[in-house]
Image: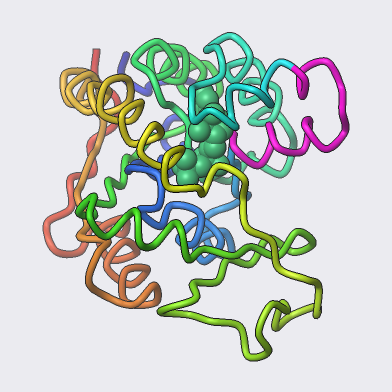
Amino acid sequence: MTGTTTNSIAAAPAVILFGSPGSGKGTQAKLLRQTIGPHISTGDMLRAHVRLDDDLGHRAETLIKAGKLVPDEVVNELVDERIQEPDCKDGLILDGYPRTVKQAQVLLNMMQRDGFRPAVVHLVVDYDKIVARLSGRRECPVCGTIYSLTSNPPKIAGKCDLDGSALVTREDDKESVIRERLREYDSQTLPILSFFKDAGVSLFEINGGEDSPQRILEKITERLSGKNGAPQESVRA
Ligand code: ADP
């Protein structure tokens, strides 16, 4: 694969935010969407189906609550449909997808088909920080803003700064489930990195454990724009 589709010169960026649960993918996606394009989170899409109480939601709910991955075919189809929406044509951000080598293979085929230029941003955070981070995470169910009880608390306890909604804790942010999610990440998701490297996909690591979200955003933006020696190659066959 070369990324050489008819529109390869102006190929739209597809930023793949990669990293363990709690590494800050969702936070960075929400900051990056102003410049890159829509934030596509398979976790958010699956939770929307759970709230709708539809068939897909029923299949996903038990797995999500247990910290297990949802079958590849289910998420592949969700992403396939979503990236063909008109708002994705100038670029998009993927958060929480791909999570298995099979998903990564399917994604690269979709990227080539639709003329996207994938770039993987790997947010690296020590696991000992992750558990503390996720157990203190609170989310606005209305606008999706993420808070941290330790590093970024809401101005009024339990309320979203932007719309005043009552903040919620995700059911899978319990310590036992967090540990299962990390096990799934180690066994199923980390192997994707060597798959991407072998496929020649542009890939860089950012330390996601020390700086503020704003500083991490700056580092990502610098690397994506090719400053600081960022790799800029497209997918290679
Ligand atoms: P996090 O990255 O913090 O674990 P997500 O919102 O991305 O949170 O995912 C929550 C859960 O949704 C996962 O534990 C898994 O059950 C399911 N899920 C999300 N994305 C995928 C995917 N690409 N493949 C399989 N399951 C997924």
Left or right, 62 with reference to 191: right
Q: Nearer the viewer, residue 115 or 44?
A: 44
Left or right, 90 with reference to 140: left
Q: Nearer the viewer, residue 159 or 214?
A: 159
Image x and y of residue 145, in percent: 64, 67
| Residue 206 is a magenta residue | no
**Residue 202 visible to the viewer:** yes
Image x and y of residue 100, in percent: 38, 19
Would you say the magenta stretch is mainly helix, strand or loop?
Answer: helix
Q: Nearer the viewer, residue 34 or 77?
A: 77
Check the image and tell me how it is coloured: rainbow
Residue at image x 57%, y 17%?
A: 76
Image x and y of residue 159, in percent: 73, 79
Residue at image x 65%, y 42%?
A: 44
- From this view, report whether residue 49 is shown above or below residue 10: above
Quarter holding residue 225? bottom left
**Residue 115 visible to the viewer:** no
Q: How many marks?
A: 0
Residue at the far bottom in the pictured view: 155
Left or right, 174 with reference to 214: right
Image x and y of residue 140, in percent: 70, 65
Residue at image x 67%, y 22%?
A: 60
| Residue 44 is a magenta residue | yes
- From this view, report whether residue 70 is shown above or below residue 10: above
- From this view, report whether residue 110 is shown above or below residue 95: above
Quadrant where the image shows the N terminus: top left
Left or right, 27 with reference to 88: left
> Which residues make up the magenta segment?
42-58
Residue at image x 17%, y 26%?
A: 197
Quadrant where the image shows the C terminus: top left
Residue at the far front in the pictured view: 176
- From this view, report whether residue 205 is shown above or below residue 116: below
